[in-house]
Amino acid sequence: MGWAGLVLALLLPLLTVPATGRPAYAAGGPVTAPAGDPARVVAEVPVGDRMLDLGVSSPETDAPVKWVRLLLPKGWSKTASRTWPVLWLLHGGGGNHKDWTANTHVEQLAAARDVLVVMPETSGCSSYSNWYNGGKWGSPAWETYLLDELRPLLERDYRAGTARAVAGLSMGGLGALKFTAARPGLFRAAASYSGAVHPLYRSTDGGLSGPDGVKLGALTCLVDWKRVWGEPGYPFGTQDPADLRQQWLWKHNSPLEQAASLRGTPLYLSYGDGTTDGGPGWSWGDGDRPPPPSPARCTDPPVHGTQDPVERAVYGMNQELRGKLARLGIPAAVCASAGGHTWPYWERELVASFPMLMSALGA
């Protein structure tokens, strides 16, 4: 990921309850169900013995084809008499369906588990949301595509079960917690690694704020950033406290604003402070099984660093979410450490959180 891509990964979410007179909403957009689940598989490409790429066509994606990578459990087939629990892994800004297998050892990690791993492609600035598009909505509608089209398609034709967990990095961390809050009970556990969990975050010391990431992310997609959720309103872009523009929509998609709906779901939050000296202090090693990351890595830095501007903003976002969860009495496993917005940290935290995710799935 380039720097701008990582920044975009930070900040594309947020919605709250719409005011009187606005249309009713479900999944972040007007209440409109896809007609007959229009998503369909147009290509199947085996990638090794236990990896399968699916090319999926859907009008909700605003693209001819989007890809989904599956890691297949032992004994899997499309005609098997059983189903498998599912782990969804969501990519970050500027990423795609290949990211997790290209940058981590998730294949080896999942091989010993009785689980189907789903890694869908969205877009570099999807925000895992149904886009506002100036109030016209329509495509892309990423939440509708993933949860209302792709999910049932996999359950119908690819032996995906109804026991699900979800995890993601950066923009994907936003997606993981946003989906969990929007659909209570759909996922049995959720993990966010350096997640953009508070898109209305406001830096008070000269760092990046939430809307800055949305704007930079949209540049990588060559689109108008206001298409995603409209404008955030005060205190961003206006000095009038009454000028909130589409802030209700930003809040509706925000894990922080919707934190109460995370109650009852096992949660894992990891994030760094923006200090990259020394690296992650952990690596997979040479074998098939990695050493467990040391709990000592979670040093809970009291302030952010300045070396990585993206993770510096992530630190502020997650500190606020962590505080809100505590005030609400919602438990979460949290690892705050020194570190930056890069794959070595995300793989470390995937390994650290994997037992929790698998336990929730019974895998």
Image (cartoon, grey):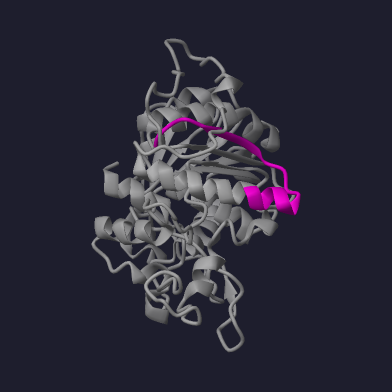
Q: Specify the segment rendered in magenta.
A: 323-340
- Residue at the image point whose x is 34% and y is 36% from the top: 307
Q: Position of residue 336 (x, y in %)?
A: 55, 34
Q: Determine whether 152 is above or below 359 in the image.
A: below
- 281 vs 264, left or right, is left
Report if residue 50 lies within the magenta region: no
Quadrant of the rendered structure where residue 11 is?
Answer: bottom left
- Residue at the image point whose x is 63% and y is 39% from the top: 85
Q: Position of residue 104 (x, y in %)?
A: 41, 28
Position of the C terminus by quadrant: top right
Residue 42 seen by the camera: no
- 261 vs 28, left or right, is right
Residue 109 seen by the camera: yes
Q: Position of residue 301 (x, y in %)?
A: 53, 33
Q: Determine whether 169 is above or below 126 in the image.
A: above
Quadrant of the rendered structure where residue 148 is?
Answer: bottom right
Depth order, front residue of 238/158:
238
- 319 vs 127, left or right, is right
Q: Residue furthest front?
A: 205
Q: Residue furthest bottom?
A: 21
Depth order, front residue of 62/180:
180
